Image: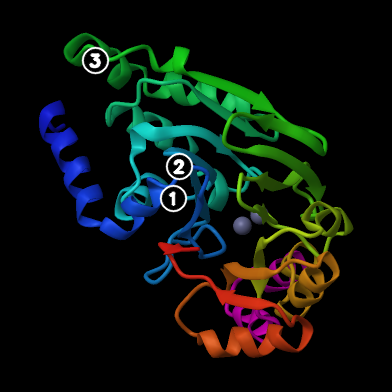
Amino acid sequence: MAPPATRRGFIGGAAAALSGPAARAAEPGKSRLILLGTGGGPTPKPNRSAPANAIVVNGAVYVIDCGDGVARQMVLAGLRLDALRAVFVTHNHSDHNADYGNLLLLSWAANLASHVDTYGPPPLKEMTRLFLQMNAYDIATRIADEGRPSLRKLISVHEISRGGPVMADANVRVSCALVDHGAVKPALAYRFDCPDRAIVFSGDTRPSENLVRLARGADVLVHEVMYGPAVDKMAAGERNAKTLREHLLSAHTTAEEVGRVATEAGVKTLVLSHFVPGGPGIADAEWEAAVRPHFAGRLVVGRDLMEL
Ligand SMILES: [Zn+2]
Ligand SMILES: [Zn+2]
């Protein structure tokens, strides 16, 4: 535990060191999109952190998915944990929610004192309650020793089971659609209409008509991607090879299919993320070559901490 003064000093120092992002943050009405983690699947990887993204508008931070290490990735991106405004979980696979509770707890330990709304499929309410219970000792200690507010009272949880409007505030208007992620139901894609552009996150899904509708005309589509030729090879090395291969092919989207989805939706920029396999074995050029024949717009092979 660091004394609060030191912690504030460190955050201020980190933000000041990153003059580019900090300067952009000052532009009113300009949205920032930061890819915090781009590796698909729950196994920790050396080259990519687990799925997480941030949108920043007028200094408020909106986090989409909370894979392992999301709070640390925010700090590396120069984002303030105490500026967290809302959290959106696409679905309850551990690569997307393992650090959902930790993001709230660690932001609070980093001086979060304002309200945070969280959104996602059930059982998000129960998960939140149990997480706070699991950490009751630390939370009570910090309230007593450090004079922090009640963490429980700062959090409002909203469970989502259908597509439609999610929330709106002065910075963003958020809507969602049900996507098709095999046995994991509901699984959601989110659309953020920011003052300057629309950004859509596919979550995990096979090619989805609902997603195409949600993303229609959006400026940016951040879409999960799987490299077909690598799936057989990857699955072959696992004890549960047959089941794993069937899951991957029925619940995810190949690079070729991602290109077609982006074209059908008419998005300007396609950002590949949630790479499966997510290890260092496949070069950016190979991902690009698989998608390019199917999408003529701007194509970005995502990397951790990339800002768009
Ligand atoms: Zn995933
Ligand atoms: Zn998933």
- Residue wearing tag 1: 68
Q: Which residues are magenta?
A: 227-247
What amino acid type should be assigned to the residue bearing mark 3?
Thr
Dot 2 or dot 3, earlier in sequence: 2
Q: Is residue 148 magenta?
A: no
How much space separates mark 1 and mark 3, taking CA atoms?
Answer: 25 Å
Q: What kind of secondary structure does the magenta stretch mostly adopt?
A: helix
Compared across the picture, whether 278 is left or right of 245 comes to left
Point out residue 141 in the picture as x, y percentages from the top left corner: 24, 15
- Of residues 50 and 201, the one nearer the viewer is 201
Compared across the picture, whether 135 is left or right of 148 comes to right
Is residue 278 shown to the viewer in this render? yes
- Residue wearing tag 3: 141
- Residue wearing tag 2: 99
Q: How is the image coloured?
A: rainbow
Q: Is residue 232 magenta?
A: yes
